[in-house]
């Protein structure tokens, strides 16, 4: 059986409270040998580390999600530096920019609130990239409706840290801009959706070695599970679709995506 990694999961979410050990066992049975649980704030990051300590095949990414920045401390770096020392913390994130919903959508807010919100996101993003560079880790990047600004903030860190643009759904041209700064992309179950030809186009244009696979569970369950809770075992269905697009075997895809993940997340070999 070809083996794969789920490089982006949210195992600490309450969606898994009833049956997390069973969900991890299903992933193992499906050939998913590594699962990376992603933090979205300090509490979530600490839970991800605790899960990594409990389950041998689980690893952690620690960071602060851009949509949560209003609750972020002024200086996030000391806490991240401490957590990053853990042997199973493999990257910083998820971090980045998200302009999809801005404060001015609420009647009590104005365009000035939007500016402040974007500035706070940029500050917290820079802090996380700084810690990543200091600790020799890479970053898991979240961007939504903010591609150009995200890329601009990353460019000063070229050569010091890299990013994986998770849940990639942009154009082929934008994907090539990601590759041009030494970063990668990863693809979710969206690749199986009928209305996601743009994602399949990106998969077709990306070379083996330039992308990884993920679920972003509990979200984005692939066909035939669409609309249900997603879980790491479903990387198998994502991989089957990606292999069809790439005109390669699942064994070839397994070798390429796992090698890419091990190169991007070197600490993934520990534990």
Image (spheres, grey):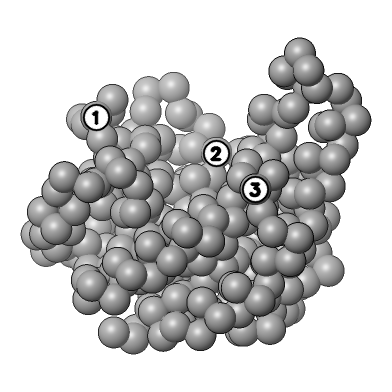
Give the x, y percent position of residue 209.
47, 67
Compare marks 1 and 2 and give the one earlier in the sequence: 2
Left or right position of 4 against 193:
left
Tell me the number on the disc at residue 228: 1
Disc 1 and disc 2 in contact, CB within 8 angstroms: no
Work out whether 264 lies above or below 168: below
The residue that disc 3 covers is 71
Left or right position of 68 against 99:
left
Q: How much space separates mark 2 and mark 3, taking CA atoms?
A: 27 Å
Residue found at the far top of this picture: 107
Give the x, y percent position of residue 225.
22, 31
Q: Residue at x 16, y 45 (%)?
A: 18
Q: Residues within 10 Å of mark 1 (few under 14, many from 20)?
A: few
Q: Residue at x 30, y 36 (%)?
A: 221
Q: How much space separates mark 1 and mark 2, taking CA atoms?
A: 21 Å
Give the x, y percent position of residue 88.
39, 79
Quadrant for residue 154, please give it.
bottom right
Say if residue 26 shows up in the picture: no
Tell me the number on the disc at residue 172: none
Give the x, y percent position of residue 94.
55, 56
- Helix, strand, or loop for circle 3? helix
The residue that disc 2 covers is 169
Q: How much space separates mark 3 and mark 1, taking CA atoms?
A: 30 Å
Disc 2 and disc 3 in contact, CB within 8 angstroms: no
């Amino acid at each position: 059986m070809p083996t794969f990694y789920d490089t982006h999961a949210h195992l600490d979410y309450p969606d898994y409270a009833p049956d997390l050990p069973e969900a991890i066992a299903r992933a193992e049975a499906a050939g998913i040998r590594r699962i990376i649980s992603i933090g979205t704030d300090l509490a979530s990051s600490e839970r991800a580390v605790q899960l990594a300590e409990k389950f041998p095949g689980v690893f952690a990414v620690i960071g602060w999600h851009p949509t949560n920045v209003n609750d972020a401390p002024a200086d996030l770096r000391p806490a991240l530096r401490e957590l990053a020392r853990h042997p199973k913390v493999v990257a910083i994130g998820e971090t980045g920019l998200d302009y999809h919903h801005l404060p001015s959508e609420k009647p009590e807010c104005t365009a000035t609130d939007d500016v402040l919100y974007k500035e706070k996101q940029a500050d917290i993003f820079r802090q996380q990239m700084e810690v990543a560079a200091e600790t020799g880790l890479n970053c898991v990047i979240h961007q939504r409706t903010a591609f150009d600004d995200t890329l601009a903030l990353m460019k000063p860190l070229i050569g010091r840290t890299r990013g994986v643009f998770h849940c990639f759904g942009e154009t082929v041209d934008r994907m090539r801009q990601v590759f041009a700064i030494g970063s990668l992309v990863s693809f979710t179950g969206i690749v199986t959706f009928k209305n996601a030809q743009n994602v399949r186009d990106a998969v077709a244009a990306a070379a083996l070695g330039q992308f990884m696979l993920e679920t972003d569970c509990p979200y984005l369950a692939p066909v035939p599970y669409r609309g249900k809770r997603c879980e790491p075992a479903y990387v198998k269905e994502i991989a089957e679709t990606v292999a069809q697009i790439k005109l390669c075997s699942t064994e070839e895809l397994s070798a390429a995506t796992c090698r890419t993940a091990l190169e991007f997340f070197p600490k993934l070999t520990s534990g």
